[in-house]
Image: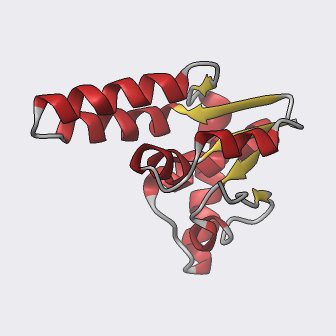
Amino acid sequence: MGVIIDPSVLIAVERGTYLLEALSGHVHYDEAGVSAITMSELLHGARRARDLGERTRRFAVAEAMFDGLSIYEFGPREAQRHAELWAHLQRAGTQIGPHDMLIAATALSRGHDVLTLNRAEFARVPGLRLVAVHDG
């Protein structure tokens, strides 16, 4: 079984409020990775940095975090799960953010858990298993 790491955790690592080493508490998973949208979110944050030094630092941190992680693409299987999830949450009036919905659909389609600091949002997704974040 695998785990998908949500951007909330990686942003906390980048800001220094969560230690990357704390992720080692999740080594019982066969595979750890991020969705392609997570990669985009972190690279977008780096590109938005106004200062060249800060931009360079953010790109380096992002690359270091992605090293050794699988990057899960959004394909037909994920699209099917996304459409199902979107319709369900919309009917229930419990929508979540569009990027979080992509992450949840990717995790559900692969049978992976989600490691997140954003439990309130992801808890609305039926069948999604959330992983408690260990203090770093």
| Residue furthest top as drawn | 68
Q: Residue at x 80, y 42 (%)?
A: 26
Q: In which quarter of the image is residue 69?
A: top right
Q: Which of 91 and 72 is in front in this view?
A: 72
- In this rendering, the answer to whether 9 lies above or below 64 is below
Choose top left, top right, bottom left or bottom right for residue 85: bottom right
**Which quadrant, please, contains the N terminus?**
top right
Q: Which residue is drawn at 68% across and 60% down?
A: 135
Residue at 80 percent across and 57 percent down: it is 129
Image location (x, y in percent) of residue 72: 61, 28
In the rendered structure, the answer to whether residue 47 lies left or right of residue 22 reads left
- The quadrant of the image that shows the C terminus is bottom right
Is residue 135 left or right of 13 when viewed as pictured?
Answer: right
Percent of width and height locating residue 8: 51, 54
* Residue occupying the point 46% across, 37% down: 37
Please determine whether, in this image, residue 125 is positioned above or below residue 40: below
Instruction: Decide which of 71, 74 is in the foreground and name it.
Output: 71
Name the side, left or right, on which 41 lies relative to 13.
left
Where in the figure is residue 41, as x and y percent of width and height? 38, 41
Residue 79 appears in the rendering? yes
Residue 128 in view (yes/no): no
How many numbered tags mark residues here? 0
| Protein image colouring | secondary structure
Q: Quadrant of residue 46?
A: top left
Residue 67 x %, y %: 56, 19
User: Is residue 109 or residue 130 the one in the foreground?
Assistant: 130
